[in-house]
Amino acid sequence: MEEAIDRSPGAHFATSGSPVERACEFVMTRVKAASGALFLQGPRRPPLACVSSSPILRRVAEQRFHRVPTAVARALVIWGDGFPVELLTSVPSPLYVLELQSKGARCVSLLADEVCTRPHSDALAFALHDLCHLDKFADPEHHLGQVGFFASLHRLVRRREWSAFERDLDDAFRRDWHHVAADMNGSAVFLFAALKMKLKMAVRRQVAREKGTPPPVLGPLTGEESRAFSDRLDELLRLLDLTPDVTEAARATSTRRDDAGSALRLLRHFESIGC
């Protein structure tokens, strides 16, 4: 992937070596500064399988570091072994992350100390968060399905009809689908069910606004809310261009995971796109 590297003095990390080696150095330098004598936690047993001959990547694969999750080490090793990652020194937009994921890649941001990192406490926490997402995205069990889901969502939100679909919904729904697009990883079925739930809650808020009442916080949808949600869901599934059998599977799939057959049919659909 083409990288975007800030070589200004405020970048605060080495500019030599490959992008993943710079990411390793960024993490290890900050962890050592924060942890002091606790920095080294002993050998990793067993070590992570690592194809790269890079000394710093071998160290990440073979050593444990204070408060650095195994998922972060796996992500760095996977990156070093060739998984497509774009190195950034800025905070990308949700749509940019979505576009990368639709192509089978992720990004990792190494931010200067003065850059706002909210909701994360600092630049190290931001980088660790990105690397944990990379680990989940690259998981062989779920990678193809995720690529297919994100490719479908990317195509959906670029359609002219998407603006009309969003128009009557609130800003919270836009934030919610941005969150699904850029800050959630795992099973494609889980991601789709999360998107459906975000839409359901947005419709509940819309119905309440039209009635001039506060939206319910808990409980199942009312009959009025259910009918409004069903109409919106039909429109969403139409915009996704699903075949009739996949459309029925998508309707039946929920966060309750109570229809294994439909979930599997939907997963195979997203995996076929991911291929």
Image (cartoon, helix red, strand yellow):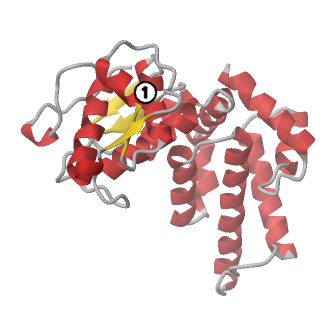
Kind of residue sitting beneath label 1:
Ala
List the single residue furthest toward the bottom.
213
Q: Is residue 1 left or right of residue 132?
A: left
Q: Residue 157, how many percent across, how many down?
A: 57, 42
Q: Is residue 63 above or below residue 82?
A: below
Instruction: Please give the name of the residue rendered at 40% of the width and 20% of the height, measured from the top-left corner.
Output: 80
> What element does badge 1 sit on?
helix
Category of crowding for the residue at label 1, using alpha-carbon neighbours closer than 10 angstroms: few (below 14), some (14–19), many (at least 20): many
Q: Quadrant of the N terminus?
A: top left
List the single residue furthest toward the left.
9
Instruction: Please give the name of the residue rendered at 70% of the width and 24% of the height, measured from the top-left corner.
Output: 273
Between 225 and 86, the residue placed more toward the observer is 86
Q: Residue 25, how many percent across, how many down?
A: 25, 33
Instruction: Please give the name of the residue rendered at 69% of the width and 39% of the height, measured from the top-left corner.
Output: 188
Report which residue position mark 1 lands on: 61
Q: Quadrant of the C terminus?
A: top right
Q: Quadrant of residue 28?
A: top left
- Any part of residue 54 in sight: yes
Q: Is residue 105 left or right of residue 205?
A: left
